[in-house]
Image (cartoon, rainbow, N blue to C red):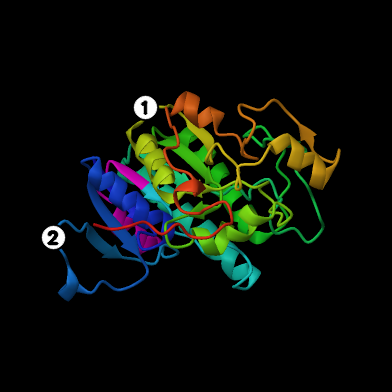
Amino acid sequence: MKVLVTGSRGKVGTAAVRALMAAGHDVTGSDLGRHDFDRILPGEPEYKQADLTDAGQVYAIVRGFDAVVHAAAIPEPTRNPPHVVFQNNIMGTFNMIEASVRSGVGVFVNISSETVPGFFFPERPVLPDYAPVDELHPIRPQDPYALSKLFGEELCDAAVRRSDLRCISIRPSHVQHAGNYERNLGAQVRDAGNLSPNLWSYVDSEDLADAIVLAVESNIPGHEVFYIANPDNVGGRDFAEVLRQYYGEQIELRELDRVDSSGISSAKAERMLGWKAKRSWRDHLDTEGRAVVRETR
């Protein structure tokens, strides 16, 4: 398939490009930055620079693709003014979906966010109603980032009502790669009291990329939303025990697939996409949260 990946220089986009190319797809990347054409290496994807908030630029790059993976976005709401976050993310998604509909793209993979229900950047404190959190959890976002991601999912709903475009929205948990496990998760491995709104959940960028490949290759009709999180929690602790220790009875505990369960359920992705995580924080950190040093030969 010919696949366009937006945000191809970001954490998610970079992993998606590699995985899609490894799966044999013809991949083109797109991002805001200029390409250094003097440093193109063999096997690198084609690249198109574009500002996705400009509809004309979007229509120019989308034409001719079988699938679109839309990973471009301002990735959280704290480093830009609220109106900038919302306008960038919502208009980029709107333009990409509109151009995909008009250009006859077959499948649109929308990289949404685990923040959609509203636990992550609230001005007034809020906790999940239950855990592990799944796609049926009530949605009550407060911040412009989560709102933009929610509206992006609703734009997908609208697109499948009026066209033959198929959409899959992926809500990744806290995305990690080899270079940031220690910085992001080390303290939580050492002490579960370093709380996170996603209840000790995470996903490896390569496992997320595998889910994106499955989404591109799927024949699922309409629009489906999937959480993608590794099945174990950061630190590998007894999830029921730490949930009660730190949250008491504030969060309802639902049935667990394993003792060291994640706080986010990916059961729907496993069932409908056939996705299974192959990696873990244990591949990168020891039990003290320090980076594992592996010998090279």
Nearest to the observer: residue 5 or residue 96: 5
Badge nearest the viewer, 1 or 2: 2
Q: Earlier in the sequence, mark 1 or mark 2?
A: 2
Question: Is 259 covered by the magenta stretch?
Answer: no
Q: Which mark is residue 219?
A: 1
The residue range painted magenta reads 55-68
Which residue is located at x 51 percent, y 33 percent? Answer: 224
Crowd band around label 2 with a 10 angstrom C-alpha radius: few (<14), some (14–19), many (20+): few
Q: Quadrant of the C terminus?
A: bottom left
Note whether 281 is above or below 74 in the view shown.
Answer: above
Instruction: Determine the secondary structure under disc 2.
Output: loop
Q: Is 5 displayed left or right of 120 in the figure?
A: left
- Which of 228/53 is in front? 228
Q: Residue at x 57, y 43 (%)?
A: 154
User: What type is the residue that disc 1 sits on?
Assistant: Asn
Contact (Cβ within 8 Å) of mark 1 with mark 2: no
- Looking at the rendered structure, the secondary structure element under dot 1 is loop
What residue does disc 2 label? 42
